[in-house]
Amino acid sequence: MSSNIRTTSAPHSRRALLRTAVAGTAAAAGAGLTLGAALPAFAGSWDPESAEPVTTPAQALRRLAAGNRRWRAQDQEHPHESGPLRRRLAQGQQPFALVLGCVDSRVPPELVFDQGLGDLLTVRSAGEVLDEAVLGSIAYGVLELRIPLVLVLAHQSCGAVAAAVHGDESGEPLPAHVQYLADQIRPSIDHGRQGEARVDATIDAHVRNVRRRLAAEPDLAGKVAAGELALVAARYELRDQHVRIPARRRCRRVRARPGRASDRDGPRFTSFRR
């Protein structure tokens, strides 16, 4: 399966096609919420209940980090749930970050980052596995809603990764569509580790590989090169509810060079405390 989002030869742009599809779906359902199509184009994301707009990837990352600190301290604000905001959101949405996470019930992004209605565009698949539906959802968020940050969120004790590792070790086929998930995760398996250490290392390797595949998408790479988008791989620890950037083996701290997508994958830190 190719990871690239296919374009068509139709005369309309992809953005026009997206708007047409969204408008058609809303009309068919008789719905008032139009997934952002009713909003004018913004250079950055908006916060309807704050005077501070989120216009850069760094601002978006800081907001997520602050929310995770509140979550860990059990000092959540539960923001953006008021009645007036709910009515405003009926006119459209402009989330400040997109989180691609696992389907695991223990890692809901809105809770982990203490965010509310209209804040996050969440895309979830077992093991953060990419397919055309996931890629299309991410492309919609970045290209149409102009979200400045895509955070790929793995987590400790991921069942999808554990199943992939077990299947690789035993050679036994997995049930139905679960095998597809394992096939997508298998290239990330760390055969230099054993037991639970192998699963744990594979979780980190896989989330970095997912981020790398997203960075190779031409539409996303263009946004990254322009400084309008950051793609960040992160990991949630169930034991302490902390979101961290997985450290790379034998890596060294480097100074980012503008214009290179590989250097724009977020701050070079291993703790999500900023």
Image (cartoon, rainbow, N blue to C red):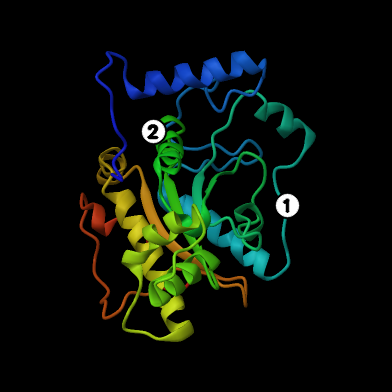
Q: Residues within 10 Å of mark 2 (few under 14, many from 20)?
A: some
Label placed on residue 59 = none
Quarter of image, res 76: bottom right
Residue placed farthest to the right in the image? 83
- Note whether 23 is above or below 235 in the view shown: above
Quarter of image, res 55: top left
Could you tell me residue 78's position as x and y percent?
A: 73, 52
Label placed on residue 143 = 2
Residue at 49% over, 57% down: 178
Could you say whether the residue bearing mark 2 is in a helix, strand or loop? helix
Residue at 53% over, 15% down: 24
Q: Which numbered mark, 2 or 1, is in the foreground of this view?
A: 2
N-terminal label among 2 and 1: 1
Quarter of image, res 228: top left
**Residue 246 seen by the camera:** no
- Note whether 103 is above or below 13 in the view shown: below
Q: Residues within 10 Å of mark 1 (few under 14, many from 20)?
A: some
Could you tell me residue 87's position as x and y percent?
A: 73, 27
Residue at 43% over, 48% down: 149
Kind of residue at badge 2: Leu
Say whether marks 2 and 1 touch (CB < 8 Å). no
Residue at the spot of label 1: 78
- Note whether 246 is above or below 126 in the view shown: below
Could you tell me residue 42's position as x and y percent?
A: 45, 29
The CA span between labels 2 and 1 is: 28 Å
